[in-house]
Amino acid sequence: MKLRAGMRLWSGVCTTEVVVIRAPKSEVELSCGGVPMTASKLALTPTESDPELALLLGKRYSDAETGLEVLCVQDGHGQVLVDGRPLSLQAAAALPASD
C-alpha cells in the first residue's frame, strides 16, 4: 500500500488505529495481528495476540529501514508490523534545561 502523511489506518483484528506521520518512499505492507491494516474502518475479526507487543496510545513508532513513522491514536492488542518487521518505539525528545 502506498502510504502518505496524515493517512489514518485501522486494524481489522483489534481496535488499533494509527496516523502516518512520515511516509516511506516505497510501498510497504503495514499489518496488525497478521492482517493488513486498511484505510477504512471495518468490522473487527478478533484474533489472539500478546498485549505486551501492542502499541501504546499517544506514542510514536518508526521503522529505520523504510523511514515510516506512525502515531498510535487508538490502542489495541495487536502487534503492528511493516513488511514483517515490528515497529520500534521512539524515545521522547529531551527538552532543553531551563537553568
Image (tube, rainbow, N blue to C red):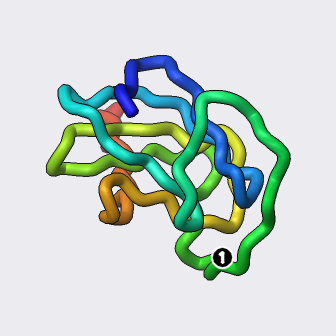
Q: Is residue 59 above or below residue 3?
A: below
User: Where residue 78 sits: x, y (%)?
Assistant: 62, 65
Residue identified by numbered label 1: 51
Q: Which residue occupies 27% across, 50% down?
A: 63
Does residue 97 appear in this view?
no
Would residue 48 be found to the left or right of residue 2 on screen?
right
| Amino acid on which the number 1 mark rests in the picture | Pro
Closer to the camera in the image, 96 or 31: 31
Crowd band around label 1 with a 10 angstrom C-alpha radius: few (<14), some (14–19), many (20+): few
Q: Secondary structure at mark 1?
A: helix
User: Where residue 16 sits: x, y (%)?
Assistant: 67, 50
User: Where residue 36 sits: x, y (%)?
Assistant: 52, 50
Q: Which residue occupies 62% across, 81% down?
A: 50
Q: Is residue 33 above or below residue 17?
A: below
Would residue 97 be found to the left or right of residue 30 on screen?
left
The C terminus, quarter of image: top left
